[in-house]
Amino acid sequence: MSKYSDMSAKSDDQLAEQLGQLKREQFNLRFQAATNQLEKSSRVREVRKDIARIKTMQTQRTAAASAK
């Protein structure tokens, strides 16, 4: 299963909670990068893409709800 299909099975509240967790992780990763303590630089990109996926899904759901 892809990450997108895993996320699409979640409710709006679960997505919002996961978005908050990812934003905190992104902040921590940026802080680690600034202090040269970042171990896995690829994780920064993964987190950024996951945040974009969730925001896209939220926008699609909002558009679908307003179209009804």
Image (cartoon, grey):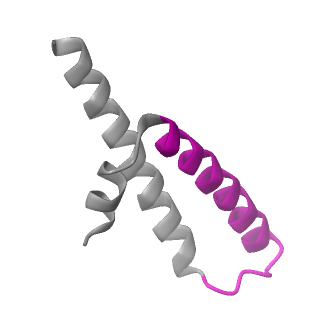
Quadrant of the image containing the N terminus: bottom left
Taking depth in this image into account, of 43 and 12 the one nearest to the observer is 12
Q: Quadrant of residue 25?
A: bottom right
Horizontal arrangement in the rendering, residue 52 relative to residue 62 (left or right)? right
- When the figure is inspected, residue 55 is found, relative to residue 44, above or below; the finding is above
Horizontal arrangement in the rendering, residue 42 relative to residue 7 (left or right)? right
- When the figure is inspected, residue 4 is found, relative to residue 13, above or below; the finding is below
User: What is the residue that sits farthest to the bottom in this orientation?
Assistant: 39
Residue at image location 62% in from the left, 85% down from the top: 40
Residue at image location 70% in from the left, 53% down from the top: 24
Q: Position of residue 42 (x, y in %)?
A: 52, 80
Q: Position of residue 41 (x, y in %)?
A: 59, 80
Residue at image location 33% in from the left, 65% down from the top: 3
Which residues lie in the magenta part?
13-40
Main SS of the magenta segment? helix
Q: Position of residue 13 (x, y in %)?
A: 51, 36
